[in-house]
Amino acid sequence: MMNIYTKKINQLYLIVKKASTPFDGLPALALRLYLVPIFWMAGTNKLMHFSNIVEWFGNTDWGLGLPFPYVMAALATSTELAGAVCLSLGIFTRWISIPLIITMLVAILTVHLPNGWQAIADPSAPFANAQVLASAEKLERARQILTEHGNYDWLTSSGNFVILNNGIEFAVTYLIMLLALIKLGGGRYVSLDYWFRLK
């Protein structure tokens, strides 16, 4: 009896797999299109404020204290901009994912890791560190001040106030997406990688 069910499930799986084959490039396309504005905004922001970024990369007192800050800033900026362009077109998808992963690893280790996991402070969520737990009191005090001295309803009509914790959550998410793109490539039918490979 169990063998009949297993056979039917396997047949159904093969039917679904065959029917979905023309669409198997869509997950890669979705990952690429999600990442494009993230890397484009990060790269253009660095480019527009390049001298400040170099200072921040190199300063040991209030910055990251990285060696060769000009080179590091140029590499990060060019990687993010080239990454956004390549991902948008689906060209060199696997190759560009490698330097983007390295950029994410550097960001995780030098910028975000000291802040823990959470990108936005939420004391009730998992992985709340001491910094996040302390944010609840500060956020409540800010709400009180805004309620007393401001138009709180108007100020929050576009969304709630939050404290940006700047943890590793987003950078790790992008890194995982890039790892998936190394495996998936640009995607069937929806990338220049696919069409160039056909020639």
Image (cartoon, rainbow, N blue to C red):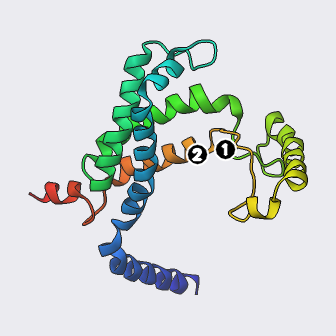
Is the residue marked by circle 2 packed among few (<14), some (14-19), or many (20+) residues within 10 Å? some
In the image, what residue occupies the spot 38% across and 50% down? Answer: 181
Picture layout, residue 193 above or below residue 154: above
Picture layout, residue 131 above or below residue 189: above
Is the residue marked by circle 1 packed among few (<14), some (14-19), or many (20+) residues within 10 Å? some
Residue 90 appears left or right of 51: left
Q: Of residues 179 and 92, which is closer to you in this image?
A: 92
Q: How many labels were placed on the picture?
A: 2
Q: Position of residue 121 (x, y in %)?
A: 75, 45
- Sequence-wise, the earlier of marks 2 and 1 is 1
Q: Of residues 147 and 121, which is closer to you in this image?
A: 147
Q: Position of residue 134 (x, y in %)?
A: 86, 38
Instruction: Tell me the element at label 2.
Output: helix
Q: Amino acid at mark 2?
A: Phe
Picture layout, residue 105 above or below residue 96: above
Q: Are marks 2 and 1 in contact (CB under 8 Å)?
A: yes
Q: Position of residue 130 (x, y in %)?
A: 83, 34
Q: Of residues 69 and 101, which is closer to you in this image?
A: 69
Marker disc for residue 119? 1
In the image, what residue occupies the spot 13% across and 59% down? Answer: 198
Q: CA distance from mark 2 to mark 1?
A: 7 Å
Which of the 4 quarters of the picture holds residue 81? top left
Q: Position of residue 51 (x, y in %)?
A: 43, 22
Marker disc for residue 170? 2
Marker disc for residue 17? none
Quadrant of the frame with the C terminus: bottom left
In the image, what residue occupies the spot 66% across and 38% down? Answer: 167
**Most distant residue in the left direction:** 199
